[in-house]
Image (cartoon, rainbow, N blue to C red):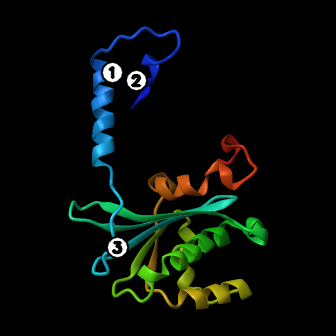
Amino acid sequence: MARPLHNLVKKEASWNWTKKEQTAFEGLKQAITEAPVLAHADPNKAYFLETDASGAALGSVLSQRQEDGRLHPIGFLSESFKGAEVNYNTHDKELLAIIRSLEHWRIYLEATPEPVTVFTDHRNLEYWKESRTFNRRHTRWHLLLSDFNFRIMYRPGKQSGKPDALSRRSDHADIPPENQLS
């Protein structure tokens, strides 16, 4: 969107403001002024939690639907996996992202009248609560999650840009950013 404006300030470029640059400028102004802004939590509204995990970190966004019909963020979470968590398989990392997010925003999400809708890009987690075969870690996590009223819904990774970006910050790992994509 901003490429025409970037091109104007290149070292060898001559300044030539055309309709293309004006359109880019207007588009940026609109994107900045209409972007969902942080909202205060309202206990009378349903909560939405978007989570994602990468190889080194997790990211999540807590949101609520506002009067304009759009989800507005209440808060963001981005943190590195610690110790043995780095070695967890994808399923467990994605589940840990949900657990850490629910615990981080416990003050808002514990014992909500409506279920918290948790969006994840890991389809198998939709059925995790119904599973009857657990290892010890899953049993412990199941107990932790029993304090929360939530439902897990699958959302393809292409639609999960916010938590995905938070889980792939380059300062979470000693991996160069271009090598973190998986």
Q: Which of marks 1 and 3 is in front?
A: 3
Residue 167, position in %: x, y?
A: 59, 57
Say whether disc 2 or disc 3 marks the residue closer to the N-terminus: 2
Label 3 residue SS: loop
Give the Cα separation between the discs numbered 1 and 3. Answer: 39 Å
Viewer-proximal residue among 164 and 129: 164
Question: x%, y% of residue 158?
Answer: 48, 51
For the residues bearing labels 2 and 1, Cβ distance under 8 angstroms = yes
Label 2 crowding class (10 Å Cα cut-off): few <14, some 14-19, many 20+? some
Residue 61: image location, x then y, percent: 46, 64
Question: Up-down: is 54 above or below 16?
Answer: below
Instruction: Tell me which numbered mark, 1 or 3, is placed earlier along the sequence.
Output: 1
Question: Where is residue 149 shown, x and y percent of the image?
Answer: 43, 86
Q: Which of marks 2 and 1 is nearer the N terminus?
A: 2
Read off the residue under disc 1. Answer: 21
Q: Name the residue under label 3.
A: 41
Q: Residue at x 76, y 50 (%)?
A: 174
**Residues at marks 2 and 1, CA–CA distance in whole angstroms:** 6 Å
Q: Residue 3 carries which label?
A: none
Q: Mark 2 points at which residue?
A: 5
Identify whether 13 is placed above or below 123.
Answer: above
Helix, strand or loop at mark 2: helix
